[in-house]
Amino acid sequence: MLTIYNTLTKQKEPFTPIEPGKVRLYVCGMTVYDYCHVGHARVMVVFDIVVRYLRSLGFSVTYVRNITDIDDKIIQRANETGEDIEHLTAHFIQAMYEDTDALGVLRPDVEPRATQSIPEIVAMVQQLLDKSYAYITDNSDVCYAIQHFEGYGKLSGKHLDELRAGERVEVDKSKQHPLDFVLWKAAKPGEPSWDSPWGPGRPGWHIECSAMSTNCLGNHFDIHGGGMDLQFPHHENEIAQSESATGQPFVNVWMHNGFVRINDEKMSKSLGNFFTVREVLERYQPEVVRYFILTSHYRSPLNYSDQDLDAAKQAVTRLYTALRGLPDTDENLTKEESSQLEERQIREDFSQRFHAAMADDFNTPEALAVLFELAREINKLRDNHALSQAAPLGRELRGLGDMLGLLQADPEVYLQGTETKADLSATEIEQRIAERQAARKGRDWATADRVRTELKEKGIILEDGAQGTTWRKV
RNA sequence: GGCUGAGUGGCAGAGUGGUCAUGCAGCGGUUUGCAAAACCGUGUACGUCGGUUCAAUUCCGGCCUCAGCCUCCA
């Protein structure tokens, strides 16, 4: 039974979809005015895991992740660079795909954009006005009146009278309540705008998610996710808007992932202490980054450091090393029946533990631990020259890895790297190995060691095994 | 001030009312021409003070420290 921690109730709950067998999931995606940083990568990977796991349980999942392609920051950035907005957003959308594809993040099923959802947004704003949940300000903005919504604060656990609105930022005097927020923003001269019953303008940030999610998934759907920082006010506002507009409950389960930190501080745009995904990918293989993200539970903070990335790299190498050279075929008929039975039992045990971990609110660290135990089992069998028995365990390992989006590469390709920045081609390396092999045959250890050292200096590690010498990149 | 969440061995990071996480690093061993990889073994870990209990890192309470939200942020 899958349990998920629900921010709304602050506890783990057994997951039951609204419609049996189907899961409708919405995640707040990127605002595309800059490259993805590691924090974005975390949301993407975390919900990728959620989707993969739900699917592996047999649910038919509709995964919607929006793109915010119009807002203040985008306008500001475009003004700074002198680019037009479509050009700017197209560039960063493209960049986002490059980053997420590299990280093995499956594309969402639907990817609505704010600028393509204006009719739905306008319709929802109109509904809110009709139902008196919204009002028009002196600035001709349309604002949502939070005091009219009874459940305001239920997600974030905040009480209106205890919030320190205006403590850090000047409150807009035209608002009835300091926390009222803009649904429709009247256009200033030179700003991009769309026509509406209230004049030209653009959608406020919160309304787009309400409009797009309900439009794609219906008024009431199963799971809504995003980063912790969106809990308030963004998701609180989404609930208020959606439930007052539709008159129906909005979302059953709210999932929020923890932050990526650097030196125990939140990684964020405003603090400027972020690394972009592409920066990190210049130094580490995508799978290492993905693994790194999964080493901590999705709700815990994830501290980013080179040391941790290096450890992640070692760990992934260990898993691929275990998979290396295992026969792919199913012809494990050589061993006696009994050992096969035993082996199957072992496999089932691993699988069961893996699933138990994942079903417990997507406990990826514990699931990963199972992978390592499986790897150890494989290595032991290999040491005992029982490769044919190890093969099914290898398939099991890859199969479980698949649910995490890991271990799907050819081990050789992973370990040796595809395109090498190294100054040596694979053929050259093979040549040096042959050279060294000859030296070894003649017991010329000095030459053999020299070749090995030289290659090591170029980032190539040689390993002499029973079946000859293999190599991999550092 | 209000509301969340967290404090685990050298590092990272799960988990549990009473022998085991796991990865990296360390140490000893097996293997190897030597290595590497692998395997085996190994470490007085659970912020602090009380309470409940036969037994608490795990449950309860106080305290301390840290992070996040209360502006935009994944």
Image (cartoon, coloured by chain):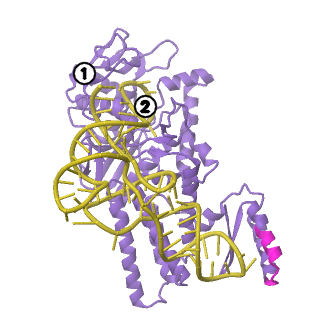
Element carrying mark 2: helix
Q: Are marks 2 and 1 on the same chain?
A: yes
**Residue located at (28% from left, 13% from top):** A176
**Residue type at numbered disc 1:** Asp
Mark 1 crowd level (few <14, some 14–19, many ≥20, 10 Å Cα):
few
Place of residue A51 in the rendered image (x, y in percent of width and height, measured from the top left): 39, 52
For the C terminus of chain A, the quadrant is bottom right
Mark 2 crowd level (few <14, some 14–19, many ≥20, 10 Å Cα):
many
Place of residue A113 in the rendered image (x, y in percent of width and height, measured from the top left): 44, 34
Instruction: Provide the residue designation for mark 2.
Output: A114
**Residue type at numbered disc 2:** Ala
The region drawn magenta spans A441-452
* Disc 2: host chain: A
Towards the viewer: A341 or A112: A341
Instruction: Provide the residue designation for mark 1.
Output: A161
Q: Is residue A180 left or right of residue A290?
A: left
**Residue located at (42% from left, 57% from top):** A365
For the N terminus of chain A, the quadrant is bottom left
Place of residue A393 in the rendered image (x, y in percent of width and height, measured from the top left): 46, 75
Which chain is depicted yellow?
A: B
Element carrying mark 1: helix
Outermost residue on the top side: it is: A138
Whether residue A105 can be seen here: no
Q: Picture quarter containing residue A313?
A: bottom right
Q: Is residue A118 left or right of residue A452?
A: left
Whether residue A402 can be seen here: yes
Q: Magenta segment: does it hold A59?
A: no
* Disc 1: host chain: A
Which chain is depicted purple?
A: A
Above or below residue B9? Residue A372 is below
Q: Main secondary structure of the magenta part?
A: helix
Q: Is residue A333 left or right of residue A98?
A: left
